[in-house]
Image: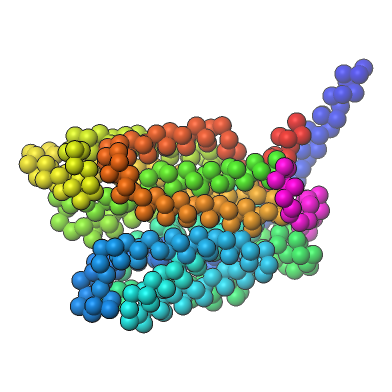
Amino acid sequence: MDDCEETRPLLVNDEHTDEDRSEQDSYLDKVKNGKLYIATFAAVLGPLSFGFVLGYSSPAIPELSKIQDPRLQLSTEEASWFGSVVTIGAALGGLLGGWIVEKIGRKLSLMFCALPFICGFTIIIAAQNHWMLYVGRVLTGLASGVTSLVVPLYISETAHERVRGTMGSCVQLMVVIGIMGAYITGLFLDWRWLAVASSIPPTLMLVCMCFMPETPRFLLSQGKRREAEEALRFLRGPDAPTEWECARIEEAYKNEEQSFSLADLKDPGVFKPLGIGIMMMLLQQLTGINAIMFYAETIFEQAHFKSSDVATVIVAATQVVFTAIAAAIMDKAGRKILLILSGVTMCVSEAVFGVYFKLTVNHNNSSLASLLTDAQGSLAEQPPTDLAWLAVGSMGLFIAGFALGWGPTPWLVMSEIFPTRVRGLGSALCVLTNWTCAFIVTKTFQNLMDAISSAGTFWMFSGLCALNVIFTAIFVPETKGKTLEEIQARFKGSYQR
C-alpha cells in the first residue's frame, strides 16, 4: 500500500509531463515562422558585420605593408597588432554587452552595437596614421564582442524549440559568410573601399532592427506583459494562441529569483551552466583553429596553388558550406552528437598535421620563419606526389570538422543554458573567456612553436580536441527540442535528485 502511494505522484507527474508536451506540440503546429525568420535575419546582420571585421585584415594587411605613405605603412609587428587588437576590443565588448543587454534590452543593444561598427570603419576609411587604424579596429572589435553576446541571446529568446538550433547556428554561419565576403571583396577593392563595403551590413542591421520586436522573455522580466504578447503575435503568427506561451514563460520567471547575488553561485542552476559555458568557450579556442588558419596560405603555396588569395577564399567557402550543413541538421541530429563528431574529426586531422610537419620540417631549427622556409624547401625537392597534399587534406578535414560542431555550437549552447537572471552576466563571462583565450593563443603561438616544435604544437592541439570529446560526453547537456525553461529546470532538477 505504501509503495503504491509512493509511486502515485511519479505517475501523476509523468501524465502531467505528457499532457504538457501534447499541449506544446499542438501549439507549435499552429505557429507560422515567416516573421521569426525575418527577425532572425535582421539580427544576424550583426554576425555578418563581425565576419567582415575578422576577414578585413587578411586582404588589408598586405596592402598596408606595401603602401607608399610612411604614416600608414605597417611593419611586421604593427601588422600583427592591426590583426589581433580586434580581440582586445571584443573581450571588452563582451563585458559591456553583458551589462547593456540587461539594462536596455536585447533589441536596443543590437542597435547600439551598430554604432561602433560604423564609427570604427569610418575612422579606418579616414585614417591618416597608425593610431587611427588601431582605434578603428578596436571599435569594430568592441562592436563584435557585443554582437557575439547579444545576437545568440536575441535568437534563443525569440525562436521556439523546433527551430532554435537552426536559427542559433545561423550566427556562426553569417560570421563565416562575412569572412568570405571580406576575402572576395578584397580581391577587387583596395583597403579603404573594403572598409566602406564592410560598413554596409551594420548600417542595414541598424535600420532593420527598428522594425523588429524586443524578446518576449525580456519584456516579461520587465513586467510588460501586453508588449510581450504583441511580440509573440508578431513572431508566431496570427493563428497561434500566444497567451499560452506567454503564461508559460511568465510562470517560469515567477518561480525564479528576480535578481542575482553571489550566493546564487551555490545554486546548481547557476554554477553548472556557467562552468559548462566557460569551458566550452575555452576549449573552442584551444582546438587550434587560429593556428590552422595561420598556416592556410603557406600550405596552399606548398601545394603549388598559383594564387594564395583565391586559396583563402576556398578555405572560407569550406567553412560556409559545413557551417550551413550544421545549421540545417542541428535540430535533427542534436548539439551533443555534432560536438563529439566535430571533436573526433579535429583530433584526427591535427594528429595528421603533426605527422606532416614531423616528416617535412627540420625541427632542430624551430623558429617559425625557419619552419616555413624548411618546409617549403624540402617540399620543393620532393616528387610531384609531395606531402603538401597531406597537409591540404588534413587542413580541409579540420576546417570541415570545426565548422560542423565546435564552431557554431558553443555560441548556441551559451544562449540556451543560463537562467534569465544571470543570462547577461553568464554570457559576458563566456564571451570574455573566448576572446581573451583567442588573443593569448594568437600572440603566444610563435613562442609555442619555438618551445615544442611545429609537430609538437599540433599534437598538443590534437590532444586538446580529444579532451573536448570527453568533456562533451560527460558534461554537455543535450538541448535539442527543449524549451529554455526546460533546460534550466534540468540543471536545478539534477540538484534536487
Residue 152 lies, in percent from the top left, at 56, 57
Residue 379 lies, in percent from the top left, at 12, 42
> In this rendering, does residue 178 appear at all?
no
Its colouring scheme is: rainbow
Total count of labels: 0
Q: Quadrant of the N terminus?
A: top right
Name the residue rendered at 37%, 48% in the picture.
289
Name the residue rendered at 46%, 61% in the picture.
88
Q: Is residue 386 magenta?
A: no
Viewer-proximal residue among 196 and 119: 119
* Whether residue 197 is situated above or below residue 58 in the rendered picture: below
Task: Please state the extent of the stretch shown in magenta in the rendering.
Answer: 243-267
Viewer-proximal residue among 346 and 337: 346
Lateral position of residue 149 relative to residue 139, left or right? right
Name the residue rendered at 30%, 41% in the picture.
451
Residue 68 lies, in percent from the top left, at 20, 78
* Whether residue 347 is situated above or below residue 200 in the rendered picture: above
